[in-house]
Amino acid sequence: MTADPALKGKTAIVTGSNSGIGLGIARSFAAAGLDVVLNSFTDSEEDHALAARLAEETGTTVRYIQADLSDGAQARKLIESAGACDVLVNNAGIQHVAAIDEFPAAKWDAIIAINLSSAFHTTAAALPMMRAAGWGRVINIASAHGLTASPYKSAYVAAKHGIVGMTKVVALETAQEPITANAICPGYVMTPLVEAQIPDTMQKYGVDRETAIREVMLTRQPSKEFATTDQLGGTALFLCSEHAAQITGTTISVDGGWTAL
Ligand code: NAD
């Protein structure tokens, strides 16, 4: 990833960025010269060490700010305490897999809060900062499940469809300003969240790990390959570039052909 002079010194807040896709996006942003705020709910030594390592590797400012995004007030405080927010990536997310009649209500509430409502709160807090700065990018990490459905993922599919809808509203409300809002819809990306789904999938379908991956998880991904966190970072960075200034209110799929089926 090369530095983009137009982005140097701008501040990007990436929610849920101590692992997986969020960390991949944070790495791409830092390599391009953006100042980055890493976030998770954990506040561990490793979280702070990760920020320090990324800053050292890239020569940019990388801060870690803890916030539990299941709480709307903490989501807003994350943005406010960062002091600037030119790029907001709403990425934090969790998953739970169960038939709808067995789906624990507490899991439903947590998924809607973290995967959907947190983005409402962070966006509401970030837009005034973007307006004051005269430029902004809102990038929501939705999913192929923001455009299609799978059984056993009711809360996740509802939240991801919801965030695609909210993205369109934010784009319309900012259409005549130098601010864009878009959603990236990944198919399967190999991250801890996906890794955690493998045992459930093996059990539900009564198959081994390899079969669960190729025949169940990647059945709908025609490329038969996982996307990478680096590819997601590159896509997010493109949305920050001037080439993407007229791309707003839409979804970009990074799904190996999933939604073409
Ligand atoms: P991950 O488990 O590696 O990362 C999830 C991140 O969210 C972590 O940083 C975690 O700390 C954070 N998080 C969880 N609960 C939080 C909370 N209460 N407050 C603050 N942060 C919290 O998973 P990932 O695969 O990198 O997922 C990132 C996003 O990408 C999610 O929104 C997910 O739905 C989406 N996504 C992932 C895939 C995939 O295949 N991995 C596909 C499509 C969409």
Image (spheres, grey):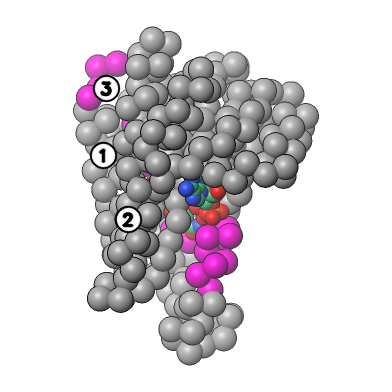
The answer to whether residue 240 of the structure is visible from this angle is no
* Residue 94 belongs to magenta span: no
Which residue is drawn at the image coordinates 53% and 73% (left, top)? Answer: 198
Closer to the camera in the image, 155 or 29: 155
Q: Find the residue positioned furthest to the bottom.
A: 206
Q: Nearer the viewer, mark 2 or mark 1?
A: 2
Stretch in magenta = 173-198
Counting from the top left corner in percent of width and height, residue 235 is at 49, 40
Q: Is residue 235 above or below residue 60?
A: below
Cα gap from disc 3 to disc 1, whole angstroms: 12 Å
Cα gap from disc 3 to disc 2, whole angstroms: 29 Å
Which residue is disc 1 drawn over? 166
How crowded pointer 2 is (Cα within 10 Å; few <14, some 14-19, many 20+) is rated as few
Q: Amino acid at mark 3?
A: Thr
Q: Quadrant of residue 259?
A: bottom left
Cα gap from disc 2 to disc 1, whole angstroms: 18 Å
Counting from the top left corner in percent of width and height, residue 14 is at 52, 36
How crowded pointer 3 is (Cα within 10 Å; few <14, some 14-19, many 20+) is rated as some
Which residue is drawn at the image coordinates 27% and 30% (left, top)? Answer: 170
Decide if residue 107 is on the left or right side of residue 43: left
Q: Amino acid at mark 2?
A: Asp
Q: Earlier in the sequence, mark 2 or mark 1?
A: 2
* Badge 1 element: helix
The quadrant in which the C terminus is found is bottom left
Which residue is disc 3 drawn over? 174
Residue 109's mark?
2
Q: Earlier in the sequence, mark 3 or mark 1?
A: 1
* Badge 3 element: loop
The quadrant in which the N terminus is found is top right
